[in-house]
Image (cartoon, rainbow, N blue to C red):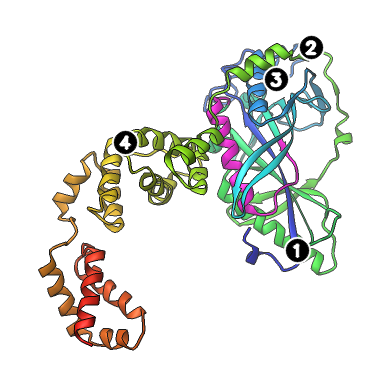
Amino acid sequence: MKKSGIEAGYEVVMGLEVHVELATQTKIFCGCEVAFGAPPNTQVCPVCLGMPGSLPVLNEKVVELALKAALALGCEISEISHQDRKNYFYPDLPKAYQISQNDAPIGKNGRLAIETADGERMIGITRLHIEEDAGKLIHDSSKGTLIDYNRGGVPLIEIVSEPDFRTAEEVKAYLLKLKSTLQYLGVSSCKMNEGAFRCDVNLSVRKVGDPQMGTRTEMKNLNSIAFIVKAIESEALRQIKLLESGDQVVQETRRWDPVKGISTAMRSKENAHDYRYFPDPDLATILLSHEMVNAAKATLPLLPDDYKRLFVLNDGIRPDVAEVLVSDKGLADYYRACAEQTAYKTVLANLLVTEVLRMADKAGDDETVIAIRPEAMVSLVALIGEERINLGIAKRVLSALWESDKRPVQIIDENDWWPLKDLASLEALAEMILKETPQILVDYHNGKTQAFGAFMGQMMKRSQGKADPALSESLFHEIAKRRL
Ligand SMILES: [Zn+2]
């Protein structure tokens, strides 16, 4: 969160646990399909329903995808790894234990670079392990609580970070980068609205300079980045208020209510030993030889940070702009499709991360889909680069392009949006404004620089945004000089 938003003297410390559904055809321990949106309880079998006597068989694809993700995040790979039972009872978990990994995860000690206001920072990744998802409880006011076991046994990776985050902005940057990294790898759709990418936030506060960590709370299953930012800000303030009034923070799991904008206590937080982890006797040890790890390494595609480097070095894009591009695979792919057709690469990149992203953002958290053909975007960028239209007009053309398949030039022609460059017309307009508002020149001659802004505002207003800014400016200075 912004420094101004935090009570003075406190520091927020956060670590994240991200659960990602892997893009397999079938579940982790059985042959049931995993396609999202099927009718409830139609993708189930004795194994994923936890029937007595059924036996799990590990889906090899899960290990392959988890290994790719661990390598892309710079993890050390465990050559010998196994799966453990995490014991707890909940109606969405018919076996009364979840198969996860405790002391021997697939990967550990990784990292991910993020761009912050102070430059690039490395976020430590403690571990990456595989596990099965639980079913889904549906609370229905008329029917009571219903259970859909389709999600039970869907393969997940859990990615646990170090407590390296201090602001909500850093959390957001990390989640976006992690999401696009996994999308580039093809290991997950990462669709947040389908629950394929969910985040738990562990958060504590402490006085600045205090080496001791404060007591932390955990907020579970946040599946929208906007909610995560709000949840962090609200929870940090709640804890600071408690401490300031002499109370203590209780270690607990909290549920964030995005509608009310508050979090409520769900249950007191268990410690790892409460789960009585032990190796699952039904599953074999996972062996990852050097050869397998090297073979997986050789298949890794270019990742967001590779593209970022290329955009900066080859295209002259600013690192912070390149970071925004590569943190959204849809946006980066679109940039690449356009960039190979234009010399105005920085104009293109800047337009994409500002106006275009703003227009596309209405769609939510998932990969940006841009409804404009790259060819049309390239000709719009050329018009800006050649200074044939200004940014104000470009924005109007963008909105029109979003709605129709016309060419930018055609849109400008039809709407008569070409900038007004005719000197005689511009001068007539300027003279009229200065005659109607003589105070502008008086103020300007008295050294009030904002008078020029007032003049330009009028020029734009009366020309419907078409007055050429550079010509208007030189005209103003000419007239001001004449009238001294
Ligand atoms: Zn099944």
Give the residue number, with chain letter if any, for mark 3: 49
Residue name at image x 25 percent, y 76 percent: 477
Mark with earlier residue (2, 1): 1
**Where does the image place residue 393, in percent across and percent down from the top left?**
26, 56
Circle nearer the viewer, 3 or 1: 1
Residue at the spot x=76%, y=60% of the render? 239
Q: Hey, what amino acid is under mark 3?
A: Leu
Q: Quadrant of residue 433?
A: bottom left
Chain-order first, disc 3 or disc 4 = 3
Instruction: Kindly tell me whether residue 293 is visible in this rendering.
Output: yes
- Label 1 sits on what residue type? Tyr
Q: Is the C terminus in the top left, top right, bottom left or bottom right quadrant? A: bottom left
Marks 3 and 4 sit apart, C-alpha to C-alpha, by 48 Å
Please give the count of numbered marks on the rendered protein: 4
Which residue is tagged 4?
374
Specify the amino acid type for callout 2: Ala
Q: Amino acid at mark 4?
A: Pro
